[in-house]
Image (cartoon, rainbow, N blue to C red):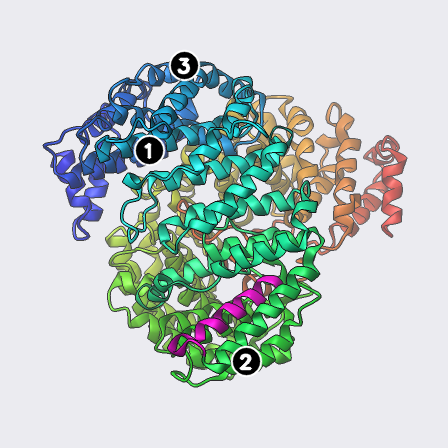
Amino acid sequence: MSVSDLLLASLNPATRLAAEKQLDEASKQPGFLSHLLSLPLNKSNPPEVRTAASIYFKNTVKRRWSPDEEDFPINDTDKGAVRAELVPAMLALSKSGADKSDRLARPQLAESLAIVAGEDYPDRWPTLMEQLTSSFSETDYNVNVGVLEAAHAVCAPWKSQVRSDRLFSTINAVVGVLGTPLLGMFRHVTGILLGGGATGLPEEQHRVLAQTLHLLLCLYEDLVDQDIPPVFEDSVPEFFGVSGGDDGLFLKILAWNPEALKGDPEEPTPTPVHNAHQVIFEIAELFVLKYNELFETRMPAFVQAVWEMVGRMGPEVREDGVFAQSVRFLSVTVKSGLHTQLFSQESTLQGLFTRIVLPSVPLRQHEVEQFEDDPLEYIRRDLGSGSAASAGSGAVEVTGRRGAATDLLRALMGVGLEAQITAMVNQAVETLVAKYKSGEGGEEAWMHKDTGVYLLSAVAARGSTMQHGVTSTNIHVNVVQFFLDHVAGDLQAPAGSIHPILQVDAIRFVHMFRNQFTKEQLLPVLRLLVTHLSSKDYVCSAYAAIAIERILFIKNGGKLLFAQADIHDFANDILSALFTVIESGGTPQKIAENDYLMKCIMRVILTARQTLTPNYLTVLTKLVNILGAISQNPSNPNFNQYTFESISALMRFVCSSNPQLVEQFEGQLFGPFTVIIQQDVDQFIPYVFQILAQMLEIHTNTVPPAYSSLVGILFTPAVWQQRGNVPALVRLIKAFISKDPNSVDVRTVLAVVQQRLIPSRVNDVYGFELLEILLANLPVETLGPLFNGILVTVMTRLQANKTPAFSYGFMHFACAAMASRAEGMGPDFFIGAVESVQPGLWTQLLTHVILPEVPRTQLRDQKVVSVGLTRLLVQSQHSVQAPAANVWPRVLEAILGLYTSPAALAKSSTESATGDDVVTAIDYEEAGAGYQAGYSRLAASEGGKTDLASYVQDPRQYLVEQLGAALQDSSKPIRQLLAQVEPGKLNQLTTAGLTI
């Protein structure tokens, strides 16, 4: 099949997997990217092929352009060809007469250009900006749009980068080439658009000029974001205006909105004019934050521009972006504290509240329609821009009008105006609730109360995060009392008796202010929420699941507020209702579309734990049926993650008291797992391997025959080529070795370690994990003869490509090997193996690699590191002889440093936590994890860490005892060596209550 045919086949669910595999193989061939890039340019290709080719091109560049890519990086010849072809390709798709396929492909190539430039400009692509600048056209502004899109794609990422000399050097180089032409084109285009020169132009040409202006503004923002270059600083009066003089180009553009470009008010997509206005307010916000000395005198004029713009805005969706950004500019100006006197005037406050805030809060008709027609999008938007979302330090970027109004209220409250703002809101809420009770507005009277509850929530929340809800509240608002007076009744109301949005408001209020309620208050609320899971209104049902899940994750003093006993009576009711909603989807995509529901199932299992045992088969069967459906066409990574996590958690808790029940899980899971492996459902294979490892570890005897057939699969090259499989494969191999070291061939395992893992900067940590599991389970007679080869591989990597992570991994591995008490193992075994590679090498490694890494030891690794180094001090003949003896005092000082630093002396909150406690407390958002494309760890499947120092309970006491015993051995110069240790370091042991 040709590449075009494969791209078409990849769009068909029935042929997608096979086509993707063939495309992946084809992509490794020289010249593939150039061929792929030619497909969108060929108008004779079907539109689907042209778009798919541009997307596949972008994804290939994203995966494999980086020089750090280890699996099939793009070769230098192909990179050179792409650099030569990419800009001309973008421009070819931009010329006049471009069709829809051209417009769809162009953004993909722009993103590709940004990736390539991010890696290669300016070092390997020094002529990029000259190439773009020389492509500007005096006659075809479609081409100019393409050039500006390309330049913006290259420059936009700089806004989020850390300031550095290299970054500033790159920006200055770009400004040197692009700055003057950019400003010249800006003046030319605004001269046409603002000076009447566009009158009579064809609509499309007028639109392209406006689009050009928008992109010029974007580039202006890109280039001044990190610092303002002189050429832009010199033009500040021209663009921002002069008090008492010219208004400046930006204000003139804000006043510009020609009839010819207004378009259809029902069209939700912003016009180029709206986009230009939005970017100007972004630039104004930037100047408030970074260059206020240049902007201060013009700030009142821009505030007035917001006032005028908001006054002439309608309710159209397409104006939401510019509205939100203009109000955000006001909020940032208020938060800056530089103009508090202006905003603190009573008349100003009242005007802001009545003219901007109040009109922005009521739901608009399209939002009510979205509640009914696209409920999942309604929930996502509500969660992302609701009144809780923008509170406090956990604020998200505001996008909607409600969110922008909330942010403005909070900004005003944050500069000492909390009492005034709260009083205004309380009065408004009182009026709105009264209107609702009187029935004003007829069938839409409910909207008054919806607005009132939202407003109260907005000012009540002071500090908030998406994960934990409101964490601190306004002292002028009694949240619980408001709930009892105005919200609880809606939560209890029978379905159909009030508008469903009011019931969602009630659930949302509980979700938002969950931390302000006591456990005793929340328990009856939880039961009410369970009834809403069966609501016919999708948003109500889904929001109930969201609220239940977050309530079950509330922590008090670092511990979860709710335990299994608290939800034992109704946990199965929650699960049954949630499964019913999920299963009603029918198709794989619809089943998996709402990950909030599956996340709630996961949280209930993590909370109910062993109390689900009597009904576990029903729950497992439901989960397996869902897994079978979604594996046909995986579409929602988060839903997939929560599904597998639910299966894993259920198994963990049910089998903890009765390991024999693992056979029931195997009976249910082996079938779908076999299908997933045979059909190579790559998104699911890492999960499958992890759960297989978990089941294998639960078995109390040796490896069951059903698992033995997997061994061959684990060592096939193809399965290791998927980067996301590697951690899960290592996890399963470790389970085999732990259960029965003879179940796998040790040389095959070492081949993986030496050829795939240790040389890899991405996967080297997993190589050390396998080495440590071999140390823990193989006798010295088996491992000893192979150890030299292992160390040669490790030393080669240390010499050729040492990284902080690899150095740490080697330090941990060395300490684990020295901590081992297996016969023939220990410090001198490890040292002897190192010395067999190169005489004198051990002292160098100890001095320059191991000891520098010890201070970085993570808490969970402290014991094995301390025990390994302790045994090095007292049980190694080599360590007390020159030249190693010269390092002996430093080794002891390094051990003491593990326990005498402030961090080490403070008890960790997780030290006493059991494995189940840690698993129960997992939270993907809190950990910044969620689904990750490369590899998604199942927290509930995690087994115990390999512990080669399991024989030690207290490593500090072990150190003291071992040193004390060594002092009695006159054959070793321990006393003399101790004398070389800094006295202050030894005294710290006494301070900790330990004496030698």
- Dot 1 or dot 3, earlier in sequence: 3
- Dot 2 or dot 3, earlier in sequence: 3
Q: Position of residue 475 (x, y in %)?
A: 71, 65
Give me the residue at 30% from left, 24% from top.
Answer: 144
Residue located beneath label 2 in the image = 488
CB contact under 8 Å: marks 2 and 3:
no
Q: Is residue 450 magenta?
A: yes
Give me the residue at 25% from left, 69% from top.
Answer: 586
Amino acid on which disc 3 is placed: Pro
Helix, strand, or loop for circle 1? helix
Is residue 98 shown left or right of residue 318?
left
Residue located beneath label 1 in the image = 211
- Dot 1 or dot 2, earlier in sequence: 1
Helix, strand, or loop for circle 2? helix
The N terminus is located in which quarter? Answer: top left
Q: Residues within 10 Å of mark 1 (few under 14, many from 20)?
A: many
